[in-house]
Image (cartoon, rainbow, N blue to C red):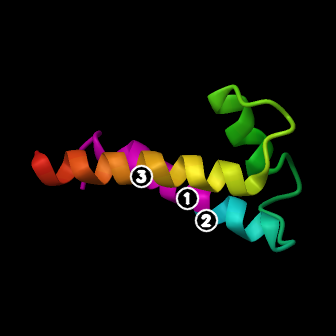
Amino acid sequence: MQDERFIPYFQLCQWKAAVKLESLGMKHSSGRSVTALVKKTFGLPRSTTRDAIIEMLQGYIDELQAQMKSA
């Protein structure tokens, strides 16, 4: 599975799962939170909720899944 098209898909899945775990109180690492990383990556305001981030990531995941099925 070396295809570069799948890398963003798996990264989005990883971020979504990590944000969900952070919302439950778990930490990803001793550094910055994944929530902060995603906000910075997508240029989201600091006031964006974790639920909104999860919905946004799920939208991107769904879009990529549809593209992969049609390819």
The answer to whether residue 66 is left or right of residue 39 is: left
Q: Secondary structure at mark 1?
A: helix
Determine whether label 2 and label 3 are within 8 Å by CB. no
* Residue type at tag 3: Ile
In the image, is residue 68 above or below residue 19?
Answer: above
Q: Which residue is mark 2?
A: 17
Question: From this viewpoint, is residue 15 visible?
Answer: no
Q: Residues within 10 Å of mark 2 (few under 14, many from 20)?
A: some
Q: Which residues are magenta?
A: 1-16
Q: Which residue is mark 1?
A: 14
Which quadrant is the C terminus positioned in? top left
Q: Nearer the viewer, residue 6 or 25?
A: 25
Q: How many numbered tags mark residues here?
A: 3
* Residue type at tag 1: Gln
Q: Residues within 10 Å of mark 3 (few under 14, many from 20)?
A: some
Is-magenta flag for residue 11? yes
Counting from the top left corner in percent of width and height, residue 25 is at 87, 72
Counting from the top left corner in percent of width and height, residue 47 is at 86, 38
Counting from the top left corner in percent of width and height, residue 4 is at 29, 39
Closer mark to the observer between disc 2 and disc 3: 3
In the image, is residue 28 above or below residue 12?
Answer: below
Question: From this viewpoint, is residue 32 visible?
Answer: yes
Q: What is the number of the mark on residue 61?
A: 3
Q: Magenta-highlighted stretch: main secondary structure? A: helix
* Residue type at tag 2: Ala
Determine whether label 2 and label 1 are within 8 Å by CB. yes
The answer to whether residue 27 is left or right of residue 67 is: right
Is-magenta flag for residue 35? no
Q: CA distance from mark 2 to mark 1?
A: 5 Å
Determine whether label 3 and label 1 are within 8 Å by CB. no
Residue at 76%, 48% (x, y): give it. 35
Closer mark to the observer between disc 3 and disc 1: 3
